[in-house]
Structure formats: structure tokens, C-alpha cells
Image: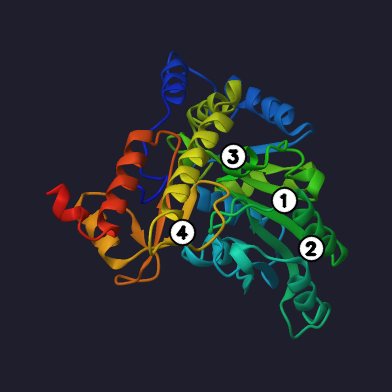
Amino acid sequence: MNFASDNVTGVAPEILAALAAVNDGPAAAYGDDAVTVRLEARMAEIFETEVAVFPVATGSAANALALSAVTPPYGAIYCHAAAHINVDECGAPEFFTGGAKLVDLPGPDGKLTARDLAEVLAGAGKGVVHHVQPAAVSLTQATECGTVYSPDELRAITDLAHGYGLAVHMDGARFANAAASLGRSPADLTWRAGIDLLSFGATKNGALAAEAVVFFDRARAADFGFRRKRAGHLFSKMRFLSAQLEAYLADDLWLRNAAHANRMAVRIADGLHRLEGAELVYPVQANEVFARLPEPVIAGLLADGFTFYRWDGPTGRMVRLVTAFDTDPAAVEAFLAAAERHATPGMERAAG
């Protein structure tokens, strides 16, 4: 009954089992263990290219450290106004880059467009000592609005960015949901589309606490080990992060988990679309649903014990509903039945 976030979930049984298995006996410290070595090889298989992989414990660390590797202190990072790095990371990207400036841009449905970015970069003052220097673009996949970038949309942005000498980072906290939604390979959605480095998320999709910074150009990762150590994310018992990621990737668990979450979101969206007085705010393409609901419906659902956020303030009518790898279909059906009951005059009395 909790649709507040995919962070409220427990851990996938397969990942718990992997943690228990790797707990048996000693292993080399600081990433020299066999599991971490295997993980990089597995990531190379998944992405169909050689990669440099650095496990970390949080998405904020992954994003901030990744951006620090491609952005100087006087640099500018272009991102959507709703991006997690801009809204929800307490200045971590600015801190770890040594003072770089986040330049937030508008865009429909949570996405940047190549056209809007082109206008900004054309007037950014590249080479002018008085201005921050364009250094990176950060794209969120899936976006904070629950939408996804197609490979063509990604390529249009990355071609433009690379033409100006910018690196392109992807915040992939919900990358699995995007990949499952689009039905395209991880390679198609990253380096083949021009992405230089990726924050690969697992925590929201069944892990305990495991993310990874993935470099598709290994040369860019030359000093990243020092950055990770300085940030406190070089775990002495790295095997426990790597084991989570290894299990996450095994037998397509990451895609199966994400596909389930996506299906649950689509079911909620379909149900709300038929509800009198309800309006979907964004296309539902991953595992988030944003909808405007009548106030009696919101109040009734909250009183029934369903948990979710009002997304536009404590009295707002726009709500965010997030599904997860373990969302119970029965809870979804109960939510929709309750919403219909609260939306239909007389049904509440009849039900009572």
C-alpha cells in the first residue's frame, strides 16, 4: 500500500542470497576480491564493450563523483531543472567538482531537448574568461517525471554536446526501468548513443545499497580511484557491494524487476485514466505515475492508509505514485478500487 518511492522497498531475495553466500570466508579487501573482478567482466558483457566499473554505495555519490571526473571547478554542467543532481543532492556535484556550476534548463516531460541545449551552448561564452566553461551534460534516464529518452533523442543531444567538447553523463538511478520500457540493449541506450559515463543504479530496483560508476572511455577513469577513495566510497569489504551488483545482473534480474515495476505503473495509469476528474500529467513510460486527482480522492486514499506524495505542495492535487520490483498487484487493484469509490458520489456511503 506504499507508493511513496521505490526506495521504501526491501531487498530482492536473489540479492540477499548473494550477500549471504559472499559472507562465507575471507576475501581480499578494497576491491581486489574475485567478485569485484568478475563484476567488471560481467558489465563488459552487458554493455558489449570494455568498461571501467567502480561500485559505490549511493546514487548521490555515483553522480557527484562521475561528474567530478569530467568537470573542472570552473565548469558548467547542463541538466534538466528537475534533475536529481539539481534538486535532491544537497550540493554534492558542486562540492566534489570543487565548485562547478549547475545550469538547469527547462524541457517537456522532464527531458532536455537538443534544440534548447543548442541555444544555450551557442551563447555560453566558451573560451571567455568571465564565464563558467561548458564541460558536461547530465541526462536522467528514466527522468524524474517517469519518462524515457529514446536512443535518437540521446544521440541528438550527445552529438551536440560532443561538438562543443562536452562530456555526457547519464544518471541511471532508474536505468533498468528505461531499458525495460524501451526494449533496447544497454549498449544502445548508453555508449552507442554517445553517453560517456553512467551512474548505474541498483538500489531502487532490489539492491540493498549498491550503485556503480561506469566509464565507457576507460581513459577518463584514470584518476577515479583516488576520487572514490577521497569521498569515502572505497569500501574495505567491497565484495558486499559487488555481490549485490553481480546478483542484480544475473539471469536478467535487473530487467525482470524493472519490467514488473513498469507494468504496475501502467496498470495504475490505466485505472486512473478512467477515473472521473483524474488527469495524467506525464506519459507513463517507466515506474512513476504523476496524476492530478480530485481532493476527495486524495484525502480518501490517504485516510485508507495508502502512502504517496502530493507533488506540488501539502494541499496540491498532483500526486506521485511509484511502483517497485516487489509491488503487489493486489495492492494496485485495492488502490484503484478505493480511488474509484472516493471519486464516485454515493459509492462511499454504499460501501459503508
* Badge 3 element: helix
Q: Which residue is mark 1?
A: 150
The answer to which of marks 4 and 3 sits earlier in the sequence is 3
Marks 4 and 3 in Cβ contact (< 8 Å): no
- The residue type indicated by label 2 comes to Leu
Q: Which residue is mark 3?
A: 176
**290, 337: nearer the viewer:** 337
Could you say where residue 21 lies in the image, as x and y percent from the top left?
Answer: 45, 15
Q: Which mark is residue 166?
A: 2
Marks 2 and 3 in Cβ contact (< 8 Å): no
Q: Which residue is mark 4?
A: 290
Check the image and report above or below for 156 versus 54: below
Could you say where residue 260 lies in the image, as x and y percent from the top left?
Answer: 50, 34
Between circles 4 and 3, the one closer to the viewer is: 4
Check the image and report above or below for 346 versus 206: below
Q: Residues within 10 Å of mark 2 (few under 14, many from 20)?
A: many
